[in-house]
Image (cartoon, rainbow, N blue to C red):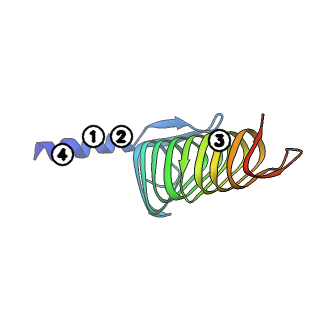
């Protein structure tokens, strides 16, 4: 019985009082584990940062994510650093790491994106997929449809690049 109370006490300590700096000057509470069903039916709420593992079945949303993000639909409102595996991966801010899914979208990415559709506003890295799209690119795209809007030749099949 003592072990059960110890585990509960440690869990509560991990989920409360931890602060994380996600955006410049903004602090959010942080948690090492998040479980999402459909926002707002997730624990803890989407106002938390995750530093660890997030499991989203089917949908989860958080402020910032650092670590392993698994699920059907993964959504970070600010930034994400790590490995994101899901059907749909969406990071509204900056993403650093590997996104693997059917659809991968990020605002600003320093990453490897692997999926059927890969999109980013500002991409540094590599996109591998059926359709790859970005406004700004420092890197390469491999796929059937490759679009770099800022490139003189914005569309190329198979391989497109801009440095």
Distance between mark 4 and mark 3 Cα atoms: 48 Å
Q: Looking at the image, is 137 positioned above or below residue 134?
A: above
Residue 33 placement (x, y as % from top left): 39, 47
Identify the image quadrant of residue 123.
top right
Q: Looking at the image, is 35 positioned above or below residue 64?
A: below
Q: Earlier in the sequence, mark 2 or mark 4?
A: 4
Q: Earlier in the sequence, mark 1 or mark 3?
A: 1
Residue denoted by label 2: 14
Q: Residue furthest front?
A: 158
Distance between mark 2 and mark 1 Cα atoms: 6 Å
Q: Residue at x 62, y 49 (%)?
A: 128
Residue denoted by label 4: 5
Could you say which disc has been placed on residue 10 in the image?
Answer: 1
Q: Is residue 88 visible?
A: yes
Q: Is residue 130 left or right of residue 146?
A: left
Residue denoted by label 3: 126
Q: Looking at the image, is 32 positioned above or below residue 61?
A: above
Q: Residue furthest right?
A: 152
Residue 140 placement (x, y as % from top left): 70, 41
Q: Residue at x 12, y 43 (%)?
A: 2
Looking at the image, do the residues carrying marks 2 and 4 touch, with CB atoms under 8 Å apart?
no
Distance between mark 2 and mark 4 Cα atoms: 14 Å
Q: Is residue 51 left or right of residue 1?
A: right
């Amino acid at each position: 019985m003592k072990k059960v109370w110890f585990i509960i006490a440690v869990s509560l300590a991990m989920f409360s009082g931890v602060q994380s700096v996600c955006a410049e000057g903004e602090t959010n509470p942080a948690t090492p584990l998040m479980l999402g069903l459909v926002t707002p039916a997730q624990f803890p709420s989407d106002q938390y940062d995750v530093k660890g593992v997030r499991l989203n079945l089917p949908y989860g949303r958080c402020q910032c994510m650092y670590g392993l993000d698994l699920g059907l639909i993964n959504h970070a409102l600010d930034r994400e650093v790590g490995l994101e595996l899901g059907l749909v991966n969406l990071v509204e801010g900056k993403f650093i790491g590997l996104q693997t899914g059917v659809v991968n979208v990020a605002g600003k990415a320093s990453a490897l994106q692997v999926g059927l559709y890969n999109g980013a506003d500002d991409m540094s890295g590599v996109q591998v997929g059926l359709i790859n799209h970005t406004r700004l690119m420092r890197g390469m795209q491999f796929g059937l449809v490759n679009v770099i809007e800022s490139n003189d030749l914005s569309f190329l099949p198979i391989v497109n690049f801009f440095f």
